Image (cartoon, coloured by chain):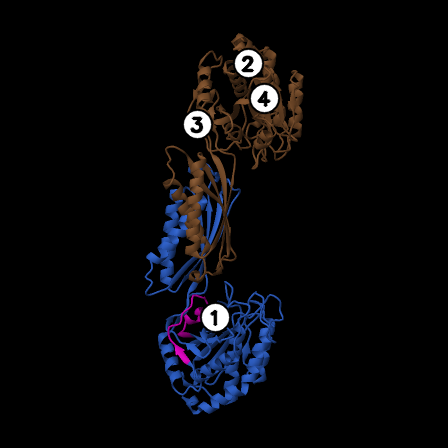
Chain colours: A brown, B blue
Amino acid sequence: MILKKTSVPELQAGVEAVFERIVGFREDLHRHPELSWQEFRTTLKIKELLAEYGIKDFSTPLQTGVIAEMVYAPGAPFVLLRADIDALPLQDEKETPYRSQNTGVCHACGHDAHTAVMAGVALALKTSGAVLPFNLRFVFQPAEEPIPSGAPRMIEAGALEQVRYALGLHMEPRLPLGVIALTPGWINMQSVRLDLTLEGPGGHSARPHETADLLWLASRIIQEGYQMVYRRINLLDSAVILTFTEIEAGRGYNVIPNKLSLTATLRISDPRKRDLFIGQFRDLLQYLEKESGAQIGFEYREGAPAIHNDPELIHSLHRNIRENFWLPVEVQTDFRTPGGDDFSFYSEKVPGAMVRFGVRTETMTANLHNGRFDVHPEAIRNAVSFFLHQLAHLEG
Amino acid sequence: MILKKTSVPELQAGVEAVFERIVGFREDLHRHPELSWQEFRTTLKIKELLAEYGIKDFSTPLQTGVIAEMVYAPGAPFVLLRADIDALPLQDEKETPYRSQNTGVCHACGHDAHTAVMAGVALALKTSGAVLPFNLRFVFQPAEEPIPSGAPRMIEAGALEQVRYALGLHMEPRLPLGVIALTPGWINMQSVRLDLTLEGPGGHSARPHETADLLWLASRIIQEGYQMVYRRINLLDSAVILTFTEIEAGRGYNVIPNKLSLTATLRISDPRKRDLFIGQFRDLLQYLEKESGAQIGFEYREGAPAIHNDPELIHSLHRNIRENFWLPVEVQTDFRTPGGDDFSFYSEKVPGAMVRFGVRTETMTANLHNGRFDVHPEAIRNAVSFFLHQLAHLEG
């Protein structure tokens, strides 16, 4: 490996040379968060930063987002490094100097830090003068949050062409600062939105026997659904969480309603188990439809698949981190969360790894999607250093 | 009994003399229905009709409604004859010449007919020249429909003073024309509105264990409530119907809501069983509150009590109807319905009887509170004749 010639002090110096710049870059993005598909300023700032360091081989196949390439060995495979760039529609509640100046929009999921980390990796590599035996493709991806999201669009635009591995990251407030999670297999869950519409003849509250009592029916669906999901799926080899979240019906306190809407979120780590559950749930609804005389409309919409970290890739990353990494980090290998991330669209096509970096400190405890969530600069240093170190060791 | 001198032909002639007039009166009220507490024209028309027949001893203690007295024997007790006079906020869907001219308001509960019947009894008595051994108090009561309703106000105004018996009527589309229901004991049910407010911390749909899942909690309340009501109350000596009718919660498909509202109607024939159920339901809610960590607010509001027809009075009415009644009616003694009626406020204070008159024909089948509900004139003839006949036989 050519890069082995680049020594640890050189890599470390590369990080330090750009560190203040990328922390400032992250704070600038944090001040100016932009919602999904509207990341115009963010896109411009990424391009400006890369260009400032001589990285000018980039394309913008969508209206927002950037694909930047660092080609060391023409014809060699690429390693994809993905950062999501969009912010959330919620109010920044922090008092930091870099708090959001965009009312009602906030980088409360750490995508500003993800963007700064991957840009920092590019800048530090460039600064260190390292040469790799493979090529790099940085995917600054718009719209990670919504359904449908940005990853499939980036893939359509060619983001995965000639890619050998895909690497992604997430800042993780459930892990302390200094902890890095390298978990093989499933590490999060697919979110599936279930929408039910119950319709019946309606009627008088004194005569439930003459009509379909839709609140009773809804209570049966909730109870049966909650029981089925934990009796029909082996909880030792996959994870599942079903939660009913929205319900609405009513035309007066003494009137049996003729319509009820019911919404749930299913989170599930295994797509085969998802299909199994959906099939069994349909059978339940068909039975209840016949039993009650109501009509039950059922639709579901899948969010990004669960991420399955490639075990061999994770094994390599774990081995590499034990050798010569210059930061005193701790690795955790069994950290999983239910939250979805559309990085899975890349990692279901090529071996991939989503790496989580702990950010919790005594004073920074707010969770993701909370207006007080923040990322300590040391977490950015950890992440940039981690990826730089991995790229220096990764087999091409 | 002095009235025994008034012969059947005289009574019958009394009815026939006023019949066209009261059918026309009923059609006039039907054309001009008025909502509860707004029965101003109706009140005026009742007074005009009574005055037209020389009945001028009336008072109007409330803004609407009329109390009219026919005093035959000063100092003797009164028989109270009650008619409700208000209409419903729904659209008349009939095509009859006397259909409602008041958009969105309709006499769909037959109160126009009740008013015409009791006015007809007064007119026919006056016309027949009958003299009774007791006095009559006609209570044309406003606002039977809402909670709170008009009966307690009329009672406060003295409607029950010196009253020996209270008689009321209801037109009944579940019984065929020609059938009269004289049912002893409970004949309908009290309606009790139950309002629940569930509050919890809310949270992410992926983390139900960290919060209170309010839809699960609501489904447990519905299921437990439905089971409790039929396991804890002896269904052989009283009737009960619990129906959950309104539910609302939701702040997004992937968010566990922090608030849920749930409404039910309890209908119950026995006030002791009502108190028993409310107590047991409270215990359930307290248990679920502790178990779930949610706060459960619970309020209930009682509608009019169930009507309990006085068995002795019903027995007298039934015996009387077998003797010399000139119309070929059929008596049913076990007809009960769940619908409330605030006649119970009178009949819980003095022996009372609510008599139901069948109105269903081949062409008139619409139910109460339906925009097509109508009353056949023969039902009015049956009812006027029935009460006239009863008054001629009732012990003072």
**Quadrant where the C terminus of chain B is found in the figure:** bottom left
Q: Residue furthest front?
A: A75
Same-chain status of marks 3 and 4: yes
Residue sitting at 55 percent across and 74 percent down? B60
Residue denoted by label 3: A185
With respect to residue A224, does A127 lie above or below? Answer: above
Look at label 1 and name its amino acid. Answer: Ile
Q: Are marks 1 and 4 in contact (CB under 8 Å)?
A: no
Chain bearing mark 1: B
Question: Looking at this view, is A107 or A183 the one in front?
Answer: A183
Measured from the top left, where is residue B288 in percent x and y?
39, 46
Residue denoted by label 2: A133
Residue denoted by label 1: B155
Tell me how far mark 3 sits from mark 4, CA to CA. 24 Å
- Span highlighted in magenta in the image: B330-353
Residue denoted by label 4: A137
User: Which numbered marker is on residue B113?
Assistant: none
